Image (cartoon, rainbow, N blue to C red):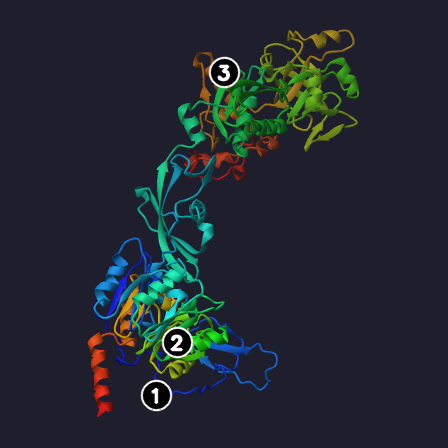
């Protein structure tokens, strides 16, 4: 092993040979002979910048004269003990490259880590229980990866970045740059991604029909108009987005949720749109003794009031008197979270809160199924004219001479009635109303009034557009409505015919121009293609929904 | 020639041995390998003596000597003193001295002509050193360290000092000592150069961690490449003849 230094054999760096005669002659005051005692010096070393060190000399001896000059000191060069290049001496007396290769500052740090990933919901496990959502090669994933490394607090982290790996390789590589004791080093950590279904996904996978909370919505009436309307409302407000399953039941709908809070939120929504009464219950499913965790199934039973729009109601005596002696026979004009009642003979109106209604819990006397068509023979506005503006709609009191359409031309049955539709009806119009004289109502409230109340023979409710409907029959509608995905259980019990006629009635209701507020909460979507011939006739039809109110059909790509 | 060796897995050779031009002292080790290396190298030229000083094995740091004499601390027992007197040649004066700083090897660095002493050494000790070893004594510090015996390895032909020694100080020291000096390291960057190696005019013994670079520096500064005992004797003979004539 020969090493040839690049200097003269005899003359080494930093060495000097002086051939002065040897005698006790010193200079600079830094050494002393036998007799004198040396001064105490303190050297202060400044950190190595690049080439030369300057050593400051300061004397600490008190009785030294002040004119002492400072000797300039320059640090010489030594050879690196490993590679032999000239360098300034340092603590290890090795050049920087030798030091870097010798001392591995990444020793003791993790280079290989295993992380768990849920393939279903794309989340990463942060033990013991937390699942963190992060995209592939995102900032959150980088933070998560760095956090999973142990012992990283002993060194300073300067930089971290992803190294590209094939997504299917299930390996994530991160290049970290760390600094320790003045040395910097970059190294790669490999993360093996293990697939492991998180708890919620495994629960769903094990039993997909698993629900935690259910809302059982019921209305004890014979038609489903309310549910059609509710369906559109729910779609517009997206209230059932969290529902796992929706099931159509007899006289109602069941909604199933994965979380109790979702069910409660849905119930709150319902409470704001219809008058409801609810109660809730829970059932124990499982119980962990060690951690005292109880798993329940929650059931909310929601009942909508059976009073619907256009119903004829006979108010109980107490309620009637508490509302200011409003005539016991009233017509329901609007149902939101409160019920609007109108006395058709006096044009007095009132609102009933949800709570107020359920305290009395009265049922309708007659429902819209029992409407009969009449033809108006004569109509006279009352003098003095009585007018009321209720909730944006105006009513005019009038006396009318009507005959049943079935009787018209056959016999002379004419009824004189007082009606609130004076603003709408003209001679020759058709109207729909309740035939009280021919009706056989089995209402306990009406019985109580037997003596004191004079029951009118006919109560007109609305103008009939039957002819217009007849003309439009067979023509497809210009708009379409969206539907909720409902599971129908027990198909045998469902009466298809009845449901279809109910739905047809509902659609006519929302097309009704006199009642634009019914359309207010719904979303109508334009149909894709329209036939040219119909465009012209549409303008004449008074009962058609004006085109401006149709929404252009939004095509949402990721609609579930 | 510089040789690398270990004493019982420890690379500080200068701690466990003392090498001069006239004799060599070696500590008593568990295995004979340390002694045998010295023996194989030096036995036919100078005596190699196994000893302890005051019962401890770090003899290189306890005593100081050159070809003229050997100074021992006050902790040396009488038997050891006698053993040394018997084993060493008669030209070597063996003296036990009373000195508060009794690790003489750490406080004094010397060759056959000049010595560097610790600044706090007693005056009597200094005089004794001058008398027994026949040297000129200079009180000095090396790179701010007062233990000159540890940080300066000296022979008649060169010297190695602590790596942090400044150039000005190197100039000054070499003027005093009249030998070429170099600032270097031994045993893979260790700065206690005199403790890591022991040297005389024709050989050096270093710890086995010493790198090739360091070894070459040592061989250069102490001029060991062409040196062997007979060469020195030849040189002396030449000068003797000259003066005689």
The reply, left or right, for residue A391 in relation to residue A107 is: right
Residue B59 - label: none
Q: Which residue is mark 2?
A: B132
Q: Are marks 3 and 1 on the same chain?
A: yes
Q: Which residue is mark 3?
A: A498
The Cα–Cα distance between marks 2 and 1, rounded to whole angstroms, is: 26 Å
Determine the chain carrying the residue at label 3.
Answer: A
Q: Residues within 10 Å of mark 2 (few under 14, many from 20)?
A: some
Comparing A552 with A40, the one in front is A40
Q: Judging from the image, what secondary structure is the residue with disc 1 in?
A: loop
The quadrant of the rendering that contains the C terminus of chain A is top left
Q: Judging from the image, what secondary structure is the residue with disc 2 in?
A: helix
Comparing A315 with B189, the one in front is B189
Counting residues from the N terminus, which is met first, the one under dot 3 or under dot 1? 1
Residue A452 seen in this snapshot: yes
**Residue A498 placement (x, y as % from top left):** 49, 16
Residue B166 seen in this snapshot: no
Q: Are marks 2 and 3 on the same chain?
A: no
Determine the chain carrying the residue at label 2.
Answer: B
The Cα–Cα distance between marks 2 and 3, rounded to whole angstroms, is: 133 Å
**Residue A11 placement (x, y as % from top left):** 30, 81
The reply, left or right, for residue B206 in relation to residue B76 is: left
Would you identify the image quadrant in which residue A420 lies?
Answer: top right
Comparing labels 2 and 3, the label whose residue is closer to the camera: 2
Q: Which residue is mark 1?
A: A19
């Amino acid at each position: 092993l020969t090493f040839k230094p690049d200097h003269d054999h005899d003359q080494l760096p930093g060495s000097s040979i002086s051939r002065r005669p040897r005698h006790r002659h010193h200079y600079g005051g830094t050494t002393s002979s036998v007799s004198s005692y040396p001064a105490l010096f303190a050297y202060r070393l400044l950190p190595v910048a690049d080439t030369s060190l300057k050593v400051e000399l300061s004397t600490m001896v008190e009785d030294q004269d002040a004119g002492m000059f400072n000797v300039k000191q320059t640090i010489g060069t030594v050879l690196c003990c490993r590679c032999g290049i000239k360098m300034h001496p340092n603590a290890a007396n090795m050049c920087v490259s030798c030091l870097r290769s010798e001392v591995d500052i990444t020793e003791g740090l993790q280079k290989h880590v295993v992380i768990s990933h849920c393939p279903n919901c794309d989340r990463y496990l942060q033990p013991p229980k937390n699942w963190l959502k992060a995209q592939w090669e995102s900032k959150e994933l980088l933070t998560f990866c760095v956090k999973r490394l142990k012992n990283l607090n002993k060194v300073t982290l300067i930089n971290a970045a992803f190294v590209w790996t094939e997504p299917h390789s299930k390996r994530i590589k991160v290049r970290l740059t760390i600094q320790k004791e003045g040395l910097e080093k970059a190294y790669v950590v490999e993360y093996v991604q293990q697939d492991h279904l998180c708890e919620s996904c495994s629960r769903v996978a094990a039993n997909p029909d698993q629900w935690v909370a259910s809302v059982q919505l019921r209305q004890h009436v014979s038609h489903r108009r309310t549910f059609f309307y509710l369906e559109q409302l729910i779609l517009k407000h997206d209230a059932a987005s969290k529902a796992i399953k929706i099931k159509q039941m007899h006289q109602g709908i069941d909604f199933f949720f994965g979380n109790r809070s979702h069910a409660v939120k849905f119930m709150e929504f319902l409470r704001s749109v219809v008058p409801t009464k609810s109660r809730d219950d829970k059932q124990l499913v499982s119980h962990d003794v060690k951690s005292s965790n109880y798993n329940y199934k929650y059931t909310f039973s929601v009942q909508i009031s059976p009073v619907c729009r256009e119903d004829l109601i006979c108010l109980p005596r107490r309620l009637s008197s508490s509302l200011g002696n409003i005539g016991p026979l009233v017509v329901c004009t609007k149902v939101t979270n409160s019920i609007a009642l109108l006395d058709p003979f006096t044009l007095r109106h009132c609102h009933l809160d949800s709570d107020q209604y359920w305290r009395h819990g009265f049922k309708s006397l007659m429902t819209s199924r029992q409407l009969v068509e009449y033809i108006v023979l004569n109509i006279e506005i009352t003098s003095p004219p009585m007018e009321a503006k209720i909730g944006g709609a105006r009513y005019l009191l009038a006396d009318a001479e009507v005959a049943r359409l079935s009787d018209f031309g056959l016999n002379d049955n004419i009824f004189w009635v007082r009606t609130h539709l004076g603003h709408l009806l003209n001679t020759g119009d058709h109207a729909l109303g309740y035939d009280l004289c021919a009706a056989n109502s089995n209402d306990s409230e009406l019985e109580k009034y037997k003596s004191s109340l004079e029951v009118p023979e006919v109560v007109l409710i609305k103008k009939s557009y039957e002819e217009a409907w007849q003309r439009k029959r067979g023509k497809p509608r210009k708009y379409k409505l969206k539907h909720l995905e409902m599971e129908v259980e027990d198909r045998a019990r469902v009466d298809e015919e009845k449901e279809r006629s109910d739905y047809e009635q509902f659609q006519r209701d929302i097309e009704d121009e006199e009642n634009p507020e019914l359309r207010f909460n719904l979303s109508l979507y334009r149909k894709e293609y329209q036939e040219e011939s119909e465009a012209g006739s549409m303008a004449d039809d008074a009962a058609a929904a004006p085109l401006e109110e149709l929404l252009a059909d939004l095509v949402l790509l990721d609609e579930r | 020639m510089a040789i690398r060796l270990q004493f019982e897995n420890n690379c500080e050779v200068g701690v466990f041995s003392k090498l001069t031009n006239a004799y060599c002292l070696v500590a008593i080790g568990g295995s004979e390998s340390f002694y045998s290396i010295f023996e194989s190298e030096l036995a036919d030229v100078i005596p190699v003596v196994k000893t302890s000083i005051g019962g401890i094995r770090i003899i290189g740091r306890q005593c100081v000597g050159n070809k003229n004499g050997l100074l021992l601390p006050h902790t040396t027992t009488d038997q050891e003193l006698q053993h040394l007197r018997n084993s060493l040649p008669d030209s070597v004066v063996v003296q036990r001295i009373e000195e508060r700083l009794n690790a003489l090897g750490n406080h004094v660095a010397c060759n056959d002509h000049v010595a560097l002493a610790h600044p706090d050494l007693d005056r009597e000790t200094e005089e004794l050193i001058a008398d027994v070893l026949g040297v000129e004594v200079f009180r000095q510090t090396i790179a701010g360290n007062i233990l000159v015996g540890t940080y300066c390895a000296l022979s008649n032909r060169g010297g190695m000092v602590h790596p942090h020694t400044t150039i000005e100080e190197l100039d000054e020291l070499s003027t005093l000592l009249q030998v070429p000096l170099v600032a270097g390291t031994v045993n893979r960057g260790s700065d206690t150069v005199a403790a890591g190696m022991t040297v005389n005019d024709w050989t050096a013994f270093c710890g086995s961690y010493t790198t090739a670079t360091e070894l070459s520096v040592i061989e250069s500064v102490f001029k060991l490449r062409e040196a062997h005992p007979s060469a020195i004797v030849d040189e002396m003979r030449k000068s003797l003849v000259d003066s005689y004539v």
